[in-house]
Image (cartoon, coloured by chain):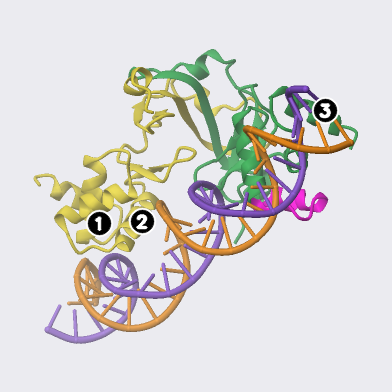
Chain colours: A green, B yellow, C orange, D purple
DNA sequence: AGGCTTTTCTTGACTCGTTCAAGAAAAGGG
DNA sequence: CCCTTTTCTTGAACGAGTCAAGAAAAGCCT
């Protein structure tokens, strides 16, 4: 709980009101990277048993819009959130169990933002998802 | 309609039964790249007014599993389908209107499959989504 | 501190894409 | 042409996420 002041500062720094649900959501995202909304609701309720799911959805949206958390959503998955923002990192996703791990950008950042033909689009981000099997699923395939 | 025989061959080649809904779905995906399920249902019904939505969902799943179509689902979008398969191409997506265009792999294929740290995962695909604004939305921002 | 305005939270209903399930219809091998 | 297996129709259900109205809280102002 020593870091609560920092989180409060992060909220104020983003011109957001500091509310108990927001602090709890931000704490949960920091301590549970890649958790989905439902998991975050459970974690938040461990602290604040009465928060509504709507407050969590709203907080996540606000925090995402403010750039304090990042929302990721690999195909076929529900939305997940993480606290590493602004560093252009990517993800490896297990096709079998959905596990996610972080991967730093393989090639610096220039190639990441350069499409061979951008069709006139003005690009601002390149998102990479590496698909495969995690070590556990590669050896013990789930039935 | 001259290409119906080819599509039939594609289905047989994948050991799938040739049914009118499947042929119509495959035709629709070929003629409407990046269409979502609902759009595909509409196109299919222009030909086969009685097909159920379930038949379309089933066909799309079967065709995807057989590798005859590819399913893509950028964050925040519903599932979309395309007929270019097996060529490791990527997509540019407009943040404002959701328009999608194809992009050939920018850097050959080796870098696409090499994560800086794969965390022990055995990777088989790298999927890249370039986010930005399409030419229309960049000039006429939608209200 | 106390009041006021604005934002945020609670509650509960609802939407929409997708899936499930049971039985009818069609495909294709013998 | 029949029989088995697969696929399609019908209709209900599910789950993540959103909408809407009013109650509560944040934070500015004096």
Q: Main secondary structure of the magenta part?
A: helix
- Residue positioned 36% across, 47% down in the render: B67
Q: Is circle 2 on the same chain as circle 1? A: yes
Q: Earlier in the sequence, mark 2 or mark 1?
A: 1
Front-most of residues C26 and B108: C26
Answer above or below: position of B63 versus A2. Answer: below
- CA neighbours of label 2 inside 10 A, class few (<14), some (14 to 19), many (20+): some
Q: Is residue A65 magenta?
A: no
Instruction: Look at the image and give the residue range highlighted in magenta.
Output: A38-53
Residue B104 place in picture, x, y as percent:
37, 24
Disc tally is 3
Residue annotated with mark 3: A6
Q: Give how far across and how far down residue A13 sits, in percent.
A: 73, 22
Residue at image coords 62%, 26%:
A89
State which quarter of the image contains the C terminus of chain A.
Answer: bottom right
Label 2 sits on residue = B62
């Amino acid at each position: 709980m020593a870091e609560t002041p920092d989180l409060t500062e992060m909220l104020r720094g983003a011109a957001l009101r500091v509310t108990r649900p927001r602090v709890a959501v931000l704490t949960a995202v920091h301590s549970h990277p890649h958790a989905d909304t439902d998991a975050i609701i459970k974690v938040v309720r461990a602290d604040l048993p009465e928060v509504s799911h709507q407050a969590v959805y709203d907080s996540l949206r606000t925090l995402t819009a403010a750039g304090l958390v990042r929302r990721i959503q690999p195909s076929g998955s529900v939305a997940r959130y993480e606290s590493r923002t602004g560093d252009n990192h990517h993800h490896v996703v297990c096709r079998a169990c959905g596990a996610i791990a972080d991967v730093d950008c393989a090639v610096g950042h220039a190639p990441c933002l350069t499409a061979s033909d951008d069709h006139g689009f003005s690009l601002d981000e390149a998102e990479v998802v590496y698909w495969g099997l995690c070590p556990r699923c590669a050896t013990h395939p789930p039935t």
